[in-house]
Image (cartoon, helix red, strand yellow):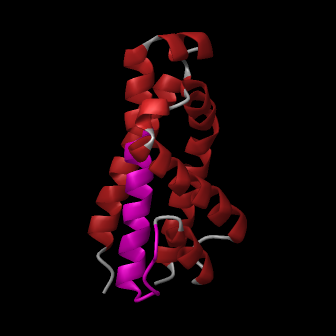
């Protein structure tokens, strides 16, 4: 039995993070890079959004008894293998999972310009993920 309420809560939280990131996307690149408060907040919100999409993926994997992931980057692959998301989206989500590792493990050397650029485009990828998850769950 799918715990759709739990998944819905995570999707709701993920949408909140995306809304917060959308506000930060309005900051111009120069101000983003030079203002530590802005880029630190953006990095945290992007990290939270990535963690939320990975958690949703892990829940789906567990609920539907898909194979266990070996890494965070494996989660989108498994969802693709099982028809939750298309391969093109899977590749972009794998890239996001790798960004998660950079945000968590390489925070001292973080390139704020790169984070700014990723923030500008990656929210659309996560929104697409949400749409596919909802579509998949509606068939179960």
Give residue 13's position: percent from left, percent from top. 33, 49
Task: Using the rendered view, name the quadrant where residue 79 is placed.
Answer: bottom right
Number of numbered callouts drawn: 0
Give residue 118's position: percent from left, percent from top. 60, 37
The reply to whether the magenta stretch includes residue 100 is no
Q: Quadrant of the N terminus?
A: bottom left
Residue drawn 37% across the image and 41% down it: 16
Residue reaching furthest right?
A: 88
Residue drawn 39% across the image and 65% down it: 56
* In the depicted structure, whether residue 14 falls above or below residue 66: above
Residue drawn 46% across the image and 49% down it: 100
- From the viewer's side, name the closer residue of 10 and 108: 108
72 horizontally vs 118: left or right: left
Task: Tell me which segment is drawn in magenta.
Answer: 46-71
The reply to whether the magenta stretch includes residue 52 is yes
Task: Using the rendered view, name the quadrant where residue 80 is placed.
Answer: bottom right
Mark yes or no: residue 37 visible. yes
* In the depicted structure, whether residue 7 falls above or below residue 83: above
Give residue 18's position: percent from left, percent from top. 46, 40
């Amino acid at each position: 039995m799918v715990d759709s309420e739990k998944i819905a809560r995570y999707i709701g939280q993920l949408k909140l993070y995306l809304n917060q990131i959308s506000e930060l996307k309005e900051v111009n690149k120069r101000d983003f890079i030079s203002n530590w408060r802005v880029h630190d907040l953006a990095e945290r919100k992007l990290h939270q959004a990535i963690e939320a999409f990975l958690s949703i993926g892990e829940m789906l994997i567990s609920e539907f008894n898909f194979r266990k992931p070996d890494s965070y980057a494996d989660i989108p692959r498994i969802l693709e293998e099982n028809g939750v998301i298309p391969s093109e989206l899977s590749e972009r989500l794998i890239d996001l999972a790798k960004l998660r590792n950079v945000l968590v493990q390489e925070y001292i050397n973080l390139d704020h310009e790169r984070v700014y650029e990723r923030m500008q485009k990656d929210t659309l990828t996560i929104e697409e993920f949400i749409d596919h998850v909802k579509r998949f769950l509606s068939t179960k």
